[in-house]
Amino acid sequence: MKLKLPFKVKINYLTLNNNKFDGKAEFHGKDYAISIHTHNNEKIIKIPFPVIGITDDEILVRLSGASGVYVEDRIKFKGKFKRIEINSDTIFHEIKNNQIKFDVLEIFVK
């Protein structure tokens, strides 16, 4: 199944583990591992399913919560991977400050 953007992924939980967040996310009834790091060389996102409409361009990635709180960053899409992986200082530090508030990952194109 190839997906069209934008799409939303439910975040079940995130826990801080050695300077990164690890957790579980759910998309179309299937569970995926999710990992969020600060970036070393470049801000990137990798996802475990094919998506129509994006290449190596920057895309808008947003984490949001029921209270209306959100954080977003423009991140380079780096293709398919075995889990959802996000490398972004902006997203990492906002989650660290508001960990229990985020429950949705949204991915948009420009």
Image: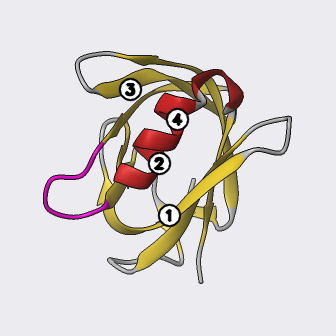
Q: Earlier in the sequence, mark 2 or mark 1?
A: 1
Q: Which mark is residue 21?
A: 3
Helix, strand or loop at label 2? It is helix
Residue at 53% x, 31% y is: 97
Direction left: furthest residue: 41
Residue 47: x percent and y percent?
41, 48
Mark 2 touching mark 4, by CB under 8 A?
A: yes
In the image, is residue 93 above or below residue 11?
Answer: below
- Image quadrant occupied by the C terminus: bottom right
Distance in Å between CA atoms under marks 2 and 1? 7 Å
For the residues bearing labels 2 and 1, Cβ distance under 8 angstroms: yes
Magenta stretch bounds: 38-43
Residue placed under numbered mark 1 in the picture:
73
Residue, disc 2: 91
| Mark 1 element type | strand
* Residue under numbered circle 4: 95
Is 89 above or below relative to 99?
below
Say which of marks 3 and 4 sits in front.
4
